[in-house]
Image (cartoon, helix red, strand yellow):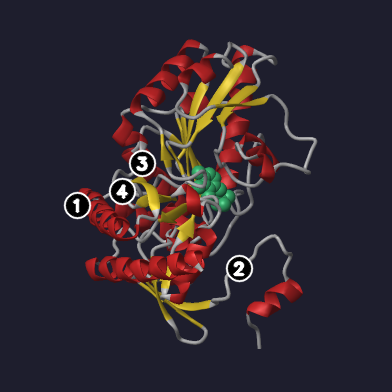
Amino acid sequence: MTNRSTFDDVMVPNYSPLAVVPVRGKGSRVWDENNNEYIDLAGGIAVSCLGHCHPKLVQRLQQQAENLWHVSNVMTNQPALRLAKKLTELTFAEKVYFANSGAEANEAALKLARKYAFDNFGAEKTQIISFESSFHGRTLFTVSAGGQAKYSDGFGPLPADINHATYNDLSSVEALISDNTCAVIIEPIQGEGGVKAASKDFLKGLRELCDKHNALLIFDEIQTGAGRTGELYAYQGYDVVPDILTTAKGIGGGFPIGAMLTTTEIASALVVGTHGSTYGGNPLGCAVAEVVVDIISDRQLLDNVKTKHRKFMDGLDRINERHKIFSDIRGSGLLIGCELKEAFHGKAKDLLSEALEQGLMILVAGPNVMRLAPSLIIPEEDIEQGLMSLDSAIANFLSKQDA
Ligand SMILES: *Cc1c(COP(=O)(O)O)cnc(C)c1O
């Protein structure tokens, strides 16, 4: 017998999971070990973009499982080749590197930027500019690039020559950037940092600064990619093309996979032997991701994401008229952030617990923001029921604040 308390006995205490232990999911519904039902507006943190156990993904995974699981990168494999071909057809990219997670995709991107600069401009061009409040993963390089000191404190010495500018403040980048800058890495919308979108002018300005200083512009689309914003990748809605793009989370629909996308010219810096991964591009992950990409690259599906966005925003506005709990409701597509009013700052987690009591799974993005990242194909009735449960959860949350 295992249950939540087993976690404390046998797991490293770096997580603090909720009391609920899910055992089954279908679409946007999840059931726990006591058979309680939940509506899932969390989507496994913007991962389960086609809900749980989508029949086409299950079928493809089973089919691949009966054929070939793993060969390593000593050989290539058909699912990886097909997926890479699709990603290059659908984006600016000409070359793809496969990893197993977002952090690994970013690790590859940052290493590539350093190597490309070294090969083409010399050993001085090593500076990486990132942004305060950004999140790029948990390897030592990516926590150092990330803009939240709490994730890198105590792990030093950290990789050097990484500076942090202020998000949406071009002058703060101008103050840091020089010909010694090899890359600027940015999330088009900061996910973990509170669902904050970059302005179009800001990203355009970054593009120009990078061009002026021969620095590579890296878009971390691990959260904003895979259809999340109603575009296959958010850059396509911004009309600003990066040099390197990283994708993970939703692209696997729940199966671990990540990828770095770039041009042939830039990719050429990673010659044989310079980087790699045993599992990267393994047939199971690539087979599933290929079906995910087939489904989510459909214009109709992407337009529906925008329609669902408006449904959520209308519903959240109505809830907020009643309860006056949020100071801001923002986001793009099905990545939505609701910032708590100052009186409730620090209490986003309490709201999450109240939601769970109402059979609703939601996310936080920092201590002050409730985040929603549901399936891109969440049915209308699940949106409605989810918002009703949220309304009740907020009522209960507020009643405890008065007490
Ligand atoms: C989740 C996330 C990562 C890290 O991905 P992992 O798969 O957890 O390593 C990196 N960047 C962004 C923007 C993310 O949202």
Locate residue 388: give its quadrant. bottom left
Judging by the rendered image, the residue that carries numbered circle 2 is: 17
Amino acid, disc 4: Gly
Q: Position of residue 234 (x, y in %)?
A: 36, 39
- In the rendered image, residue 82, in percent from the top left (x then y), is placed at 39, 49
Q: CA distance from mark 4 to mark 1?
A: 14 Å
What is the count of numbered marks? 4
Of the numbered discs 3 and 2, the one sitting upstream in the chain is: 2
- Vertical position of residue 232 compared to residue 209: above or below: below
Label 2 residue near ligand 1, CB within 8 Å:
no
Amino acid on which the number 1 mark rests in the picture:
Gln
Q: Which residue is mark 4?
A: 333
Disc 3 under 8 Å from ligand 1? The reply is no
| N-terminal label among 1 and 2 | 2
Q: Circle 1: is it few (<14), some (14-19), or many (20+) Cα within 10 Å?
A: few
Q: Amino acid at mark 3?
A: Tyr
Nearest to N terminus: mark 3 or mark 1: 3
- Residue position for label 1: 300
Residue behind label 1 places its C-beta within 8 angstroms of ligand 1: no
Q: Measure the C-alpha gap from mark 3 to mark 4.
A: 11 Å
Give the CA separation, mark 2 to mark 4: 27 Å
Q: Position of residue 51 (x, y in %)?
A: 37, 66
Upstream in the sequence, badge 4 or badge 1?
A: 1
> Could you give the CA–CA distance between mark 3 and mark 2, rounded to whole angstroms?
30 Å
Label at residue 233:
3
